[in-house]
Image: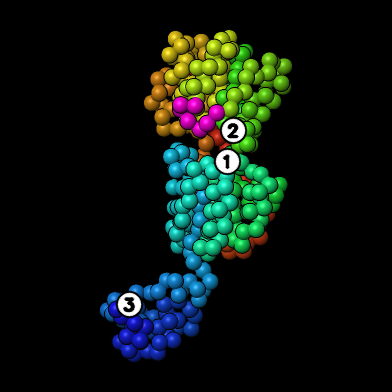
Amino acid sequence: MASLHDVARLAGVSKSTVSRVINNEYGVKEATKIKVMQAVEECGYVVNQVAKDLKSRKTNLVGVIVPRVSSYATALGVDGLTAVFEKAGKHVLLANTQQNSHKEIEFIQLFNQKRVEGIIFYATHIDKALVEAIQRSQVPVVLVGQDGSLFNIPSVVHDDVRVGYEAGRRLTEKGCKQIGFIGVDESDLAVDKLRSQGMSQYLEAQGLEPLVFHSHGQFSIESGYQQMKSLYQQYPHTDGIFCATDRIAIGVIKALKELNVEVGSQVKVLGVGNDELSIVISPSLSTFSYAFDKAGESSAKLLLSLIEGEHQVMSKVVLNFQNVDRQTC
């Protein structure tokens, strides 16, 4: 294997000059740079990236923590942030917590040990232990999906309260009077609490009946199916259902059809996310389109600015959404 000495001898320069060219340091003439790089190619010299990183104190690595890799939202988000990091010469290390809160803190600590330059964390909740772990991090952390701005943690969030408010408007304008909400674990402030809160605010502002029910399940089609099977027996007069995610809504549609309920006329259904399955299900799902790819891009740009030490004027980015009208509402 070729060494630094071999490159220097072939290029007719000192080893220190070769080192300065490889590390892109100032003070080397362009002609010398070209000569050294030609020698590197001829020798087949391979740069010791670990040694180079130790010298520069930069690894060009960023950590990304996600709750599950099977999520449509996560997939689009990771695509978005990866594109930004690649342009900046950064490499992404991906960690999947499988929705285990203990693993979240472990990965924050592990990424710090691996000397990443920053961390993007797709959070499903915020609690004291998590906030303290982020505050102890030696590198900047950007939250996606949950609002950590009250704890001075930079965050990229969706407008969850407003989407719930808009869901209330859409359902009631289609004639719904008995509306229920199917959410997820109540520890998920954004997906469960804020979306249902927005719906309740609309109903109260319009002087309408409050939510008939607010149930808690999982981020899955099966969870939506099982919940709806049970809930419709308890609340047979329900004529509108707002689901925290499209996957839950797809399970709801399946359950209602098995109960011989006409979805879209007898019972209106709304989801959130514009999952690729929402247009395949029959009847097709009315929903809200979230800019998951933009969330990834925005979080990456925010983290890069933090890595460069730029002063932050805003600690929170709120992304907009779009109504998607289909057959269920």
Disc 1 or 3, which lies upstream in sequence? Answer: 3
Instruction: Give how far apart the Cα atoms at labels 1 and 3 are.
Output: 46 Å
Disc number at residue 124?
1
Looking at the picture, how far across and down is residue 143, in whole percent?
A: 59, 48
Whether residue 212 appears in this view of the structure is yes
93 up-or-down from 197: above or below: below
Q: Position of residue 10 (x, y in %)?
A: 30, 87
Tell me if residue 230 comes above or below residue 278 in the rendering. Answer: above
Which residue appears farthest toward the left when viewing the image?
A: 42
Instruction: Give the labeled residue for mark 2.
Output: 185
Judged by depth in the image, the label closer to the viewer, 1 or 3, is: 1
Q: CA distance from mark 2 to mark 3?
A: 54 Å
Residue at 64 percent of width and 43 percent of height: 126
- Part of the protein shown in magenta: 217-223
Mark 1 Cα-neighbour bin, 10 Å: few <14, some 14–19, many ≥20: many
Q: Is disc 2 placed on a helix, strand or loop?
A: loop
Amino acid of disc 1: Thr
Q: Is residue 17 left or right of residue 45?
A: right
Under circle 3, the secondary element is loop
10 Å crowding of disc 2: few (<14), some (14-19), many (20+): some
Tell me which numbered mark, 2 or 3, is placed earlier along the sequence. 3
The residue that label 3 is drawn on is 45
